[in-house]
Image (cartoon, helix red, strand yellow):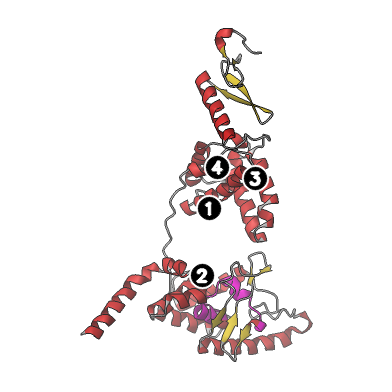
Amino acid sequence: MTVTNDDERTRASNGEAKITQLASGSYRAQVMIAGRRHSVAGKTKEEVKRKRRELLHNADRGILPPTQRLTVAEHVERWLEDVVKHSVRRRTYETYHEKMRLYILPALGGVKLERLSPADLQKLYGELLAHGGAGGGPLSPRTVRHVHTYLHGCLGQALKWGLVPRNVADLVSPPKAHRAEIKVLDLEQVRRLLAAAAPTRWAALVALAVGTGLRQGELLGLRWADLDLEGGALHVRRQLGPDGSFSEPKTAGARRKVGLPRSVVVALREHRAAQLASRLLAGSEWQDGDMVFCTWQGRPLGARNVYREYRLLLERAGLPPVSFHALRHTHASLMLSQGIHPKVVQERLGHSTVALTLDTYSHLIPSMDRDAADQLDALLA
């Protein structure tokens, strides 16, 4: 029921519809844009007028109001299936899907897409930092920034499709993520780790990780066909994912050739001989995938198995419980500390740019700068 008192309505000019007061006390107006009728509502006439002006202003700029009243959940589902699924790797798609389900949809899924506000997003980020989402406890600022990135892309697509007049994620301030301290092993610790691994079947894996800086997935995806032991090099052509599937490197820079230290070549030759002996013992149970690192039956190694054995090696060597990824950082640290050019380090690590390498390992730069100054001083003396 509406109240039709002349004092409670105003005629809009220039073809705009009247503002009507509803029985609830709020106000509503309808506007014709591009042949379609659109409604705006508010608690006061002034609010309705403002919303009506915004609609007309956006229409003049070619930004039409949405014709579909989708919820955030409905748009997220369509975005994931129609855009993300066909533009990223399967594992990346699964990550997007999981983060949306855990952190975004429980709080915002039922909100109408066109009514989503910057305040809604800011409130969500605060709640995730304080309490977390359906996936567990409070989230780190870094994770919440990832959530913001997913939302920004999702709402950006809504803007391209004409479902919303703006990307409200542009108006939100995500938390600042503090970079975690990179942990590395020093030279003495590396020697202790290699010594602890030497009598085990993990010697070549550890030696290759320290000697090349390959990512764990790249190491576990290696085939013997990717290695040139005579020439002392390997080619990174694929990686093993957490789900056990193989995929190509994400970037052109990650698909690379990496030189091998002589000690690593020796370790790989010994590993090859031991693997051939295991293959004979396995007999018909052996599954030949040409894998450099595999189970006793030739199957790809699981990341959990590697992690478990690696932690045992650290304990045996009396070393702190650094991650396996720390061996990649250790490789970079050792090279930079020896004055090897950052461009070489970048190419060995498969970083997309040398700026990324320098930014990641900037904590090493002050000591390198001091060494350079001392060398220059000696030259000029």
Instruction: From the image, tell me which residue sits under label 1.
Output: 146
Q: For the magenta stretch, what is the residue range?
A: 205-225
Residue 377 occupies which quadrant of the picture?
bottom left
Q: In the image, residue 107 lies at what x, y percent? A: 58, 40
Q: Residue, x 59% and y 33% (percent of image)?
A: 59
Q: In the image, residue 147 lies at what x, y percent? A: 54, 49
Q: Which residue, as the protein is rendered here, is positioned at the far bottom?
A: 230
Q: Residue, x 66% and y 48% (percent of image)?
A: 79
Instruction: From the image, tell me which residue sits under label 3.
Output: 76
Name the disc covering residue 312, or none. none
- Residue type at mark 2 is His
- Residue type at mark 4 is Asn
Pointer 2 or 1: first along the chain:
1
Task: Determine whether label 2 and label 3 are within 8 Å by CB.
Answer: no
Q: Nearer the viewer, residue 21 or 16?
A: 16
Q: In the image, residue 70 lies at what x, y percent? A: 67, 37
Instruction: From the image, tell me which residue sits under label 2.
Output: 351
